[in-house]
Amino acid sequence: EEEEEEEEEEEEEEEDCIAIDITDEPDPVRPGSPLVYTIHITSTCPGDDIVTVRADTDPRTMPLQTGGNGRISPTGAQWSNVLVPSALKLRTRVQENIETTEPLRLTATAKSSEDQEDTDLIESENCGDGLMNPGEECDDANNRDFDGCSSNCYLERGYCGDGILQRALGEQCEPALHDPSLAYGCSSDCRFASEFCYNGKIELGEQCDEGPRNMDLPGAQCRTNCSWARCGDGILDPGERCDDANLLTGDGCDNACRREVSAFPGLTIEFPSLGLGEVLSGESGFPSLPQNLPLGSLSALSELSTSHPPSGDTGPAAVAVLAGGAAAGFGWMRRKQRMFKKNRK
């Protein structure tokens, strides 16, 4: 009996060695948006260990993809033969039209250890109320895209290095805003930069680190900058229909890396003597725009017009009206030229 008790105590001590820590991104999150969990498994006892890890998701989220050898189920995911320490990735999507008063909860277990992570929900109706709410980068009092502030209240205009942190561009940091006292830097592509990336251990500023398996290739789980593979990283991974290195909509590839159909199929507008590129470059009296302005922000052209559209009319329609008006103007000039030549004859 004493031997059995000692064995049970040893098993309990071994199980207590496992520690679990869950991080979520983003937090808070909006209904209908992606939600990514990272489950960190470590051991407080010397020596490596192999465990089975289980993650139970909130019923209001839908599991989509796992890192490593994980298996997806309708209620979560499970990983077998996980070598400690490890960081396991679980990608989910929050369902639309759900109750937002209670946070989303993920529960992860390994042996007798357990951890829970709560993610706050932002009521979707808050975006577009004209007030800056938690989780919003902008709020222009409407729920339209292509007017500088997206329907999810993310900034649509800007570029890495402009001093404004933009999640739609996949930015983790901005060099001008980064605290130099932190143990990691901010790279020129506005992602965290760890000098310890590639050592196989997850350090501060890293989402993952698989050592020599860090690759910028389709299907790799961890990138060479120690960031998890994701929609918007510019690499076409399995399950993605496109990846244009951003999470903006209206540029042919949406924020879930699915191809988009033009809002005006078959519409082609020609500019006889003045190319669209010339307008964007600041020629012919038009002010210049940032070189890296996202394509989804072409509605900025409506601000360059001397006449203003009706109040509240912004977005693709305003661009089409502006461009259509320009094309009509060129057509009128051509007709005047033909009439002038005919009268001279």
Image: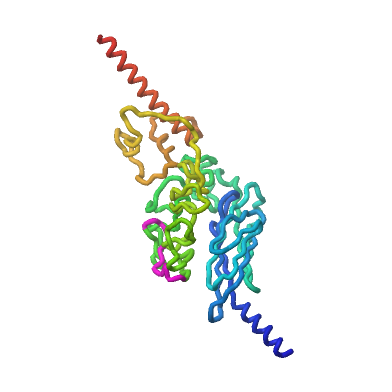
Left or right, 194 with reference to 313: left
Residue 278 falls inside the magenta stretch = no
Say which residue appears at 38% left-offset and 65% top-offset: 180
Please count the marks in the image: 0
Say which residue appears at 33% left-offset and 20% top-offset: 333
Tell me which corner region of the image, top left, top right, bottom left or bottom right, holds residue 44. Answer: bottom right
Left or right, 274 with reference to 92: left
Say which residue appears at 34% left-offset and 17% top-offset: 335
The N terminus, quarter of image: bottom right
Relative image position of residue 155 (x, y in whole percent): 47, 47
Which one is nearer the viewer's eye here, 235 or 285?
A: 235
Q: Is residue 222 visible?
A: yes
Hey, which residue is sitting farthest bottom in the picture? Answer: 2
Position of 284 relative to 295 (above/below): above
The colour mode here is: rainbow
Residue 199 falls inside the magenta stretch = yes
Q: Is residue 27 visible?
A: no
Left or right, 86 with reference to 109: left
Which one is nearer the viewer's eye here, 78 or 163?
A: 78
Relative image position of residue 137 (x, y in whole percent): 49, 50
Relative image position of residue 59 (x, y in whole percent): 67, 55
Hey, which residue is sitting farthest right in the picture? Answer: 1
Relative image position of residue 106 (x, y in whole percent): 63, 62
Position of 131 relative to 185 (above/below): above
Q: Which residues are magenta?
A: 188-200
The C terminus, quarter of image: top left
